[in-house]
Amino acid sequence: MTEDEYMLILGSNVYADPVYTLSYQANKDTGDKIHLVTLKNLSDGLILTTEIQDENSYPIAKINNNELIQGSEKFDLQGKIEEINGLTLTRKNDGVVIFNVRITEDGYVAVNGIFYAAGKKIHITDREVTIDDVPQQTINGVKMHDSIFIGTSDILITDSGIWIPSCVNQTGNNREQ
């Protein structure tokens, strides 16, 4: 990580890597992953790629390299990640925020949004991750909070918690049994 790279805060834990890929895995047996978000720390800033669907699996926005390349006329994308309100996707008719990526006061990148994948509602914020309104509080099977993980480019959200294939926990003292 360099001075200009941002760490990701997700579900009250911090992840440090130049690239973050958040995916959802509905079935561990098949190993199939559904891409939710990719954030890349590049020399010219954070770069976001995501596709957001509604509850009926209808695509409402596809963002590639911070640009809305496909979207419903019912939604609007405004701002920049590094600006105070971040990059925000809103529903035009009522102003509801569907998705937001911003830099926090503490200098972390925070993702806040609702994703629908494999019939599930996945809500991601800097403080918590829920699937169908059930908190996912474990990382690799251990309940953890306020920890820092290094080398965690692939973050996998499952119905049984968050899984990180290879990571180093730098704090290690915030485990709950």
Image (cartoon, rainbow, N blue to C red):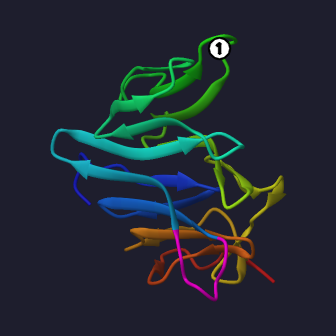
Name the residue rendered at 56%, 34% in the picture.
99
Q: Residue furthest top?
A: 93
Q: Quadrant of the N terminus?
A: bottom left
Relative to 15, does residue 49 appear above or below in the rendering? above
Compared across the picture, whether 110 is left or right of 39 comes to: right
- As for residue 31 lying within the magenta part, the answer is yes
Secondary structure mostly seen in the magenta stretch: loop
Name the residue rendered at 81%, 55% in the picture.
132
Relative to 70, does residue 18 appear above or below in the rendering? below
Compared across the picture, whether 17 is left or right of 32 comes to: left
Magenta residues, start to end: 26-33
Name the residue rendered at 61%, 47% in the picture.
126
Relative to 130, does residue 163 appear above or below in the rendering? below
Name the residue rendered at 73%, 57% in the picture.
119
Viewer can see residue 103 = no
- As for residue 29 lying within the magenta part, the answer is yes
Task: Name the one closer to the observer, 37 or 120.
Answer: 120
Compared across the picture, whether 29 is left or right of 121 comes to: left
Name the kind of residue labelled 1 in the image: Gly
Relative to 59, does residue 28 appear above or below in the rendering? below
Say which element carries label 1.
Answer: loop
Viewer can see residue 95 = yes
Q: Position of residue 25 (x, y in %)?
A: 60, 72
Q: Position of residue 115 (x, y in %)?
A: 63, 47
Task: Name the one closer to the observer, 21 or 26.
Answer: 26
Q: Position of residue 17 (x, y in %)?
A: 34, 64
Task: Name the one closer to the observer, 82 or 39.
Answer: 39
Q: Which residue is mark 1?
A: 95
Q: Could you classify mark 1 by the number of other residues whose Cα lies within 10 Å: few (under 14), some (14-19), or many (20 or more)? A: few
Task: Name the one closer to the observer, 70 or 155.
Answer: 70
